[in-house]
Image (spheres, grey):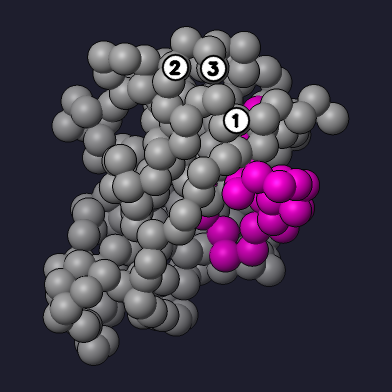
Amino acid sequence: MWAKNTVNSSIKYTSRLVETIKIEDGKICNLEYHNARASKSRRELFGEIAPLDIEGALLKQHIPQKGIYKCRVLYRRDIEEIQIDPYDVPTIHSLCALQDDDIEYAHKWERRDKLDALRERKGNCDDVLIVKRGFVTDTSFSNIALYDGTKWVTPSTYLLRGTKREKLLCEGILHEKEVRIEDLHLYTQIALINAMIELGDVVVAIENVVWKHS
């Protein structure tokens, strides 16, 4: 169960929140899941109950009708900025597993200082796999799914409640499970998933995960 993180609404946050939304051939993808997450963050952080009209704001933008675009909706109580840029799926062949028992990322902030600091320690690998108190969580920019030979499972110990992860769970394509770092040998592949990356687009062989203990 994802823990509720309620913060005093009088706090002035230096970072904005962000929803990263996939636009494919003019279609705004998975909008209901982005709306749900944005509403939850605004309610918990600012006490804001009124929904954020992401769709209305996007309809005022020029939406490209061909190709895949990454749309970033930056907001606090209200939408402050929208960025739309072409998107290419990243190439990830290896992951460096790193331990951080204090990291928190329950809300999708524009500033990602702790995640960026971990990524700088990836060495020769393409990205990091974050381990918290012995449990596998996420990479620096995505949730993950692990293939056990028959089905895809996703760690119940995630850092961020990703919209693609949520959708795939609702569809029964993913199955939630606790995954310890020592359990990785039970799986053959790790797939990276986020709003921009579909299940199967970016897959890392389990032997290409390097466990860095310190």
Q: Secondary structure at mark 2?
A: loop
- Where is 180 relative to 129, above or below? above
Position of residue 109 measured from the top left corner of the image (x, y, whole percent): 56, 59
Residue 184 numbered tag: 3
Amino acid at the residue labelled 3: Leu
Tell me which numbered mark, 2 or 1, is placed earlier along the sequence. Answer: 2
Residue lying at the far right of the rendered structure: 214
The answer to the question of whether label 2 and label 1 lie on touching residues, with beta carbons closer than 8 A, is: no
Q: CA distance from mark 2 to mark 3?
A: 6 Å
Q: What residue is at 22 percent from the left and 54 percent from the top?
A: 30
Residue 187 numbered tag: 2
Q: CA distance from mark 1 to mark 3?
A: 9 Å
Residue 167: in magenta span:
no
Q: Secondary structure at mark 1?
A: strand
How many badges with numbers are in the image? 3
Residue tagged 1? 209
The answer to the question of whether label 2 and label 3 lie on touching residues, with beta carbons closer than 8 A, is: yes
Tell me which numbered mark, 1 or 3, is placed earlier along the sequence. Answer: 3
Q: Is residue 171 left or right of residue 174?
A: left
Which of the two residues, 55 or 165, is positioned nearer the viewer here? 165
Provide the residue span drawn in magenta: 105-131
- Where is 127 relative to 187, above or below? below
Q: Is residue 57 left or right of residue 40?
A: left
Residue 113: in magenta span:
yes
Can residue 55 be seen in this snapshot? no
Which quadrant of the figure has residue 35? bottom left
- Label 3 environment density (alpha carbons within 10 Å; few <14, some 14–19, many ≥20): some
Amino acid at the residue labelled 1: Val
